[in-house]
Amino acid sequence: MIICITGVPGVGKSTVAKKLAEQINAVLIDIYDFAIKNNLYEEYDEAEQTYIVDEDKLFQEIDNYIRNLNSKYIIIEGNFAHLYDKGDLYIVIKTDPNILYERLSKERNYPYNKIFTNIWAMNLEVIEDELEEMKKEYYVFYNNKEDDIDNIIREIKRLIENKEKSN
């Protein structure tokens, strides 16, 4: 089962993905790190302080990588993991915009324009719109307080169990 966990930077998707992977013994793929390590980017965008990833090449390489894995569960995590169209379960993590602002400005030291872009994308549900265009079912969870992570993981495990029963 391929589980795609997505959301804008700073919402807690990496924390959720890492803890979930440990609990269900899943292979975890950080989609951005995978792209950088395999040189699957077109250029570095100085203004946004990020690499522009070649999604076609990236997803082809992920397919190749997954084909060679012997794991019941694979988690693909990152702010564009939802664009991987072979997922079995899509999870969107969000948070309160004020909390996101604090995380991105103080913990990550993002420039204002990058903070604004990410809050804007989350509030306008850009990821959800893309998933709907792809005709993918998805689930949204909010990570606003400390115990939310454990609750989110518990709910994802329940979704996995239900999906396995229905297949």
Image (tube, grey):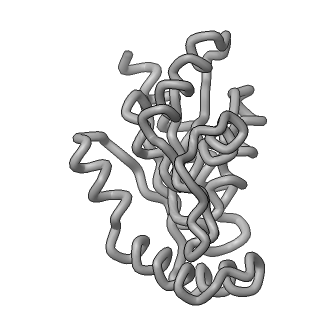
> Horizontal and vertical percent for residue 117?
46, 78
Q: Residue at x 60, y 42 (%)?
A: 31
Looking at this view, name the residue that lies furthest to the front: 43
Q: Is residue 166 left or right of residue 151?
A: left
> Horizontal and vertical percent for residue 148?
64, 64
The residue closer to the viewer here, 101 or 56, is 56
Q: Residue at x 43, y 45 (%)?
A: 82
In this view of the protein, can residue 143 be seen by the observer? no
The relative height of residue 1 versus residue 10 in the rendered view (above or below) is above
Q: Residue at x 27, y 58 (%)?
A: 129
> Horizontal and vertical percent for residue 74?
61, 27
Q: Is residue 135 left or right of residue 97?
A: left
The image quadrant that residue 41 belongs to is top right
In this view of the protein, can residue 89 be seen by the observer? yes
Q: Residue at x 22, y 48 (%)?
A: 133
> Horizontal and vertical percent for residue 164?
46, 21
Q: How many marks?
A: 0
The relative height of residue 69 versus residue 110 in the rendered view (above or below) is above
Q: Is residue 141 left or right of residue 75?
A: left
Location of the C terminus by quadrant is top left
